[in-house]
Amino acid sequence: MRILVITSQFPIVGDPNRGRAVYQTVCALQRLADVQVVSPVATYPKWAQPGSYVYRPPSNTFRVGVKTEYVSYFALPGISRPFNGWLASRALRPVIRRLQPDVVLSYWLYPDAFGAWLAAQRNGIPIVVGARGSDIRVRDALSKRLTRYVVERAQRVLTVSADLGRLAVDEYGASPNAVRVVPNGCDIEIFHPGDRRAARMALGIAADREVVLFVGRLVIEKGVRELIDAVRVLRASRPNLELVFVGEGPAKNELLVRASGLPIRFEGGQPPEKVAKWMTAANVAALPSYSEGHPNVLVEALACGRPVVACGVGGVLEIVDEYSGILVPLRDAKGLAVGLDAALVRNWDEGRLASRFSRSWAQVAEETLAVCAEVVGAPGARQCL
């Protein structure tokens, strides 16, 4: 089967960890099928760079271990949003005509999957779209309408959690028969229990420190302000507490100012092996996000035998229970401080935490391939939709 994966959530120059869950899926999927990735990337004029994320220009000289082609389309922050799906489709049409895949698999609903749907329709090719989390929890009315357009029309909608599957049906018009839940996997060759003392020595962390670890994009929606404020609340009662941020994002400068005078480290983006070492060194992993799909960072922390503290939103509730972590109230620094304190006091069973998730990326790929096979085998799959 020839599968064309279309997504902007993929490694790119300057951001090699971008879209890591999608990348892991594709790496496993290419062992089962003929897979080509096309990554549509919006390009902006120098005088109008986006403020919502750290912009990286595309480059086809960048190698990621998967057949990948980066295509670009012109955009203006905010102004071109209603047209970005159509602009992406124009860049994608000649690629789809040239490659003639059996099925298009597109992650990130708007503008990626919207543009992929328009281009696939023109070439009579069926499409499977994948929702990751924030791409289906859309706030503004226009983006929600454009997202609904593609969710209603795709032959299958993949979601990483049952919660997102319900959302796709209830708020975005997906047919219940079209939704398939395919949760993320975890690479246990990388994420597994290890020697905390040795990890701390390698990372330069004192043995007596109580380390709270955040891994992810540095954006306000991840609850990073509340996390810093929670450290400020706990500082007097837990003098050995240290917060470590692993990741990059547009909120970094604000957070650096907010963290002034507090025991907080910013370690930047790290490859998976280094992330695993930080998890091994930590006492607890924190993710106080305002919304989530199926956050892999929590799965990976648990696989390393570390408890988690998170807000009970979206797919988090499918990962965290009383045996694996502590749920805290949303947008509440004091409540987060209480949760972190409780997690640091409790004696957790490392082996029990690590055994909770054994789902591999190979299993994710097999389930994804099965969904693609469904639409390829459907009547009229190669006819215009």
Image (spheres, rainbow, N blue to C red):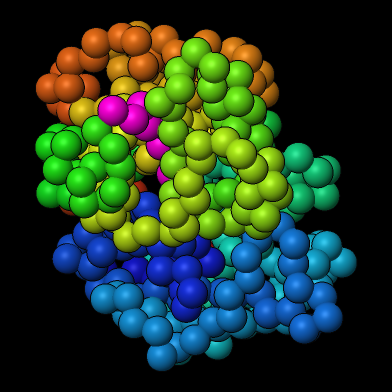
* Residue 221 pos. (x, y %): 65, 39
* Residue 79 pos. (x, y %): 87, 66
**Number of marks in picture:** 0
Q: Residue at x 59, y 80 (%)?
A: 57
Residue sitting farthest toward the right = 79
Whether residue 89 is visible, yes or no, is: yes
In this image, 242 relative to 290: left or right? left
For this rendering, which residue is in front, 102 or 209? Answer: 209
For this rendering, which residue is in front, 308 or 10? Answer: 308
Give above or below for 58 relative to 366. Answer: below
Q: Quadrant of the C terminus?
A: bottom right
Give residue 58's quadrant in the image: bottom right
Give residue 172's quadrant in the image: top right
For this rendering, which residue is in front, 201 or 140? Answer: 201
* Residue 70 pos. (x, y %): 49, 81
Q: Residue at x 49, y 86 (%)?
A: 59
Q: Is residue 209 magenta?
A: yes
Q: Please provide the residue range marked out in magenta.
A: 208-216
* Residue 160 pos. (x, y %): 42, 39
Give above or below for 213 relative to 32. Answer: above
Q: Residue at x 17, y 22 (%)?
A: 350
Q: Quadrant of the N terminus?
A: bottom left
Q: Main secondary structure of the magenta part?
A: strand
Q: Is residue 289 magenta?
A: no
For this rendering, which residue is in front, 348 or 26? Answer: 348
Q: Residue at x 58, y 75 (%)?
A: 56
Whether residue 373 is visible, yes or no, is: no
